[in-house]
Amino acid sequence: MSRVFSGIQPTGEPHIGNLFGAMFNYVKLGEQYGKNALYCIVDLHAPTNPLAYDKAALTQRTYEMALANLAVGLDPEKVIFFVQSQVREHSELSWLFTVQTPLGELERMTQYKDKADKLESIPSGLLMYPVLMAADILLYKADTVPVGEDQVQHIELTREIARRFNHTFGETFPEPKAVLTKEALRVPGVDGHGKMSKSKGPSSTIGVLEDFGSIWQKLRVAPTDPARVRRTDPGNPDICLIFDYHKLFSDLPTIEMVNVECRRAGIGCIDCKKALLPGIERILSPIQDRAAELAKDPDRVRAALHSGAEQARAIAAPVMEEVRSKMGFMPE
Ligand code: TYM
């Protein structure tokens, strides 16, 4: 039986990279897999990065991330939707994988290297981060993991961890594969500095729940093709992040128009940015409206998460028992 698992960190507002790279896929796969689709707000990952972790804000951000996913269309009646720290087995399996994972495999992870470079003192949890990720997925014996491209290396490590465990203790886990969204592998940040990322802060992101006035302020000053100095210079949409956004938000005639007109200097960058707004409103407005509706009843959101954690535990508990027994721990 095939099973889906994915996780999203509550380290900041969800952005359009999360939305197109992963969250829309959660909903789509959720419709196919029903209760065999598990989605998790991975709050235990949040404290691994001291630059992004904020104790005072963690509960609220966890709630907001849940709300955003529900607003995008996750149905907690149909899928299993829960908070990682409420299912203790994640931590336990993570430890049992940690003791088996060679340090060298973790030190090679590019996300670890990028984050560790910015820190004076590196918490070991930052290095172990992908082991916890592997535990998240394998705790449910999931084989299908919808993610953005930045997580692919972590999924490969998960496969390696599953393979090693199966080899040492007998066939137990599937080797999961990443499911990517072709058009949104790596949505660029609106500041022009690489991938859009929660941890880079609001100057990099367009929030799923962000006010349209604020979105426009960011788009207005966003960098475009640097070779296009004057309005009359032809531009190259292939290297312009605004064109990347058009491909996500705009209808085909608009994408085609922008593509042609930019190349022959028929449209200026500001007009090209303005042409993005109807598409942004078309996609984000209904999500923002649903979020406002859901926010009126926070207890309902919390109750859905509570029930999700119970359902997740029911799958996790027998898997943990199997793992403990295979590893030779004394039964209770
Ligand atoms: P996180 O919280 O950084 O991001 C959530 C999801 O959004 C994707 N994503 C993007 N996709 C395209 N373009 C972007 N600019 C962009 N930014 C983020 C991410 O790839 C991710 O799918 N380690 C994970 C959370 C996690 C997890 C797991 C995922 C923990 N355990 C188990 C899958 C399975 C993370 O930090 O995602």
Image (cartoon, rainbow, N blue to C red):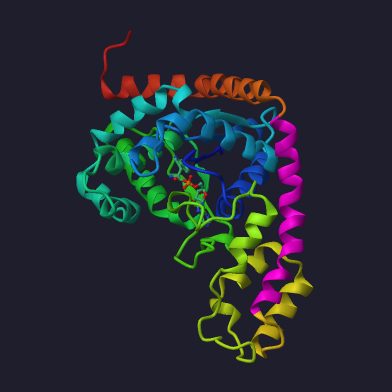
Does residue 93 appear to the left or right of 183 in the view shown?
Answer: left
**Residue 159 painted magenta:** no
Residue depicted at x 38% and y 46%: 159
Evaluate whether residue 267 shows in this view.
Answer: yes
Place of residue 93 in the rendered image (x, y in percent of width and height, measured from the top left): 35, 28
Residue 289 image point, x, y percent: 76, 42
243 to the left or right of 123: right
Q: Quadrant of residue 68?
A: top right
For the N terminus, give its image quadrant: top right
Instruction: State the extent of the magenta-drawn residues as a range.
Output: 269-295
What residue do we see at 58% from left, 60% from top?
184
Residue 308, position as x, y percentages in the image: 59, 24
Q: Quadrant of residue 63?
A: top right
Total marks placed: 0
**Which one is nearer the viewer's eye here, 321 or 269?**
269
In the rendered image, the vertical position of residue 236 relative to residue 24, given as above or below: below
Q: Residue 259 occupies which quadrant of the picture?
A: bottom right
Residue 37 appears in view = no
Q: At which x and y percent is residue 258?
A: 70, 78
